[in-house]
Each structure stands twice: as structure tokens, then as C-alpha cells.
Image (cartoon, grey):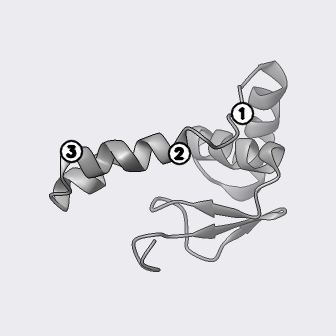
Amino acid sequence: MRSTLARRRVLHVITRDIVSDYLAWHVVVNGGDSILEALELEARYQVSFWDALVIQAAQVAGAEVLYSEDLADGQRYGTVRVKNPLTHGG
């Protein structure tokens, strides 16, 4: 996300404010079970391990929408639907 904001020449202070807002979000800590579930998601959906770990964290957090510029917009992974913030205006 930071590199995208930098490419769009978003001011440092605005980027800092955006990131500060994100700190209010629930943080999912990955452990052994997370890794095992991510391996299952990787195989089931043919995504990278790191993308699978992000999907798994979104599922654990109870998120309905996962904002990602890397995954296919509109794709569903179980209960989570991907939304590309760059094509939807955030």
C-alpha cells in the first residue's frame, strides 16, 4: 500500500494519517494453525502462500471484504470477497 501511495505522490503526512487510521483495526497474529490453513487455501484456490495467509487472516478477523490490488477483484474465498480499492476509488 505504501508503494502505491508513493507512486501516486501522496504526501507523507497524509500517508501517516491513513496508516494511523489502520491501527484501530483488529490485528490477526499468525501461528501454526494459520500457516496450516493458509497451505490449504493455497492449494484450494491456486494463490500464493502469502496471499493465502492474508485471506486466512481476513477470514479469522470476520471480514466480509478484503481490499487487495493483487487478488482478482470480486473473487470470493469462502466468506471473504476481494475488492480492489484502486478500481473502486477506495
Closer to the camera: disc 1 or disc 2?
Answer: 2
Q: Residue at x 80, y 19 (%)?
A: 32
Q: Residue at x 20, y 51 (%)?
A: 6
Q: Dot 3 corresponds to which residue?
A: 12
Q: How crowded is the residue under tag 1: few (<14 C-alpha within 10 Å), some, or many (20+)?
A: some
Looking at the image, residue 27 sits to the left or right of residue 64; the answer is left
Q: How crowded is the residue under tag 2: few (<14 C-alpha within 10 Å), some, or many (20+)?
A: few
Q: CA distance from mark 1 to mark 2?
A: 13 Å
**Residue 20 found in image quarter:** top left
Looking at the image, residue 7 sits to the left or right of residue 52; the answer is left
Q: CA distance from mark 3 to mark 2?
A: 15 Å
Q: CA distance from mark 1 to mark 3?
A: 26 Å
Foreground: 39 or 11? 11
Depicted 79 relative to depicted 43: above or below: below
Marks 1 and 3 close (CB-CB < 8 Å): no
Foreground: 61 or 55? 61
Closer to the camera: disc 1 or disc 3?
Answer: 3
The residue under label 3 is which amino acid type? His
Q: Furthest residue to the top?
A: 32
Looking at the image, residue 79 sits to the left or right of residue 85; the answer is right
Looking at the image, residue 47 sits to the left or right of residue 64; the answer is left
Depicted 6 relative to depicted 57: above or below: below
Q: Dot 1 corresponds to which residue?
A: 28
The residue under label 2 is which amino acid type? Tyr
Q: Circle 2 — which element? A: helix
Q: Circle 3 — which element? A: helix
Q: Residue 7: image x %, image y %?
A: 18, 56
Q: Dot 2 corresponds to which residue?
A: 22
Q: Residue 80: image x %, image y %?
A: 76, 62
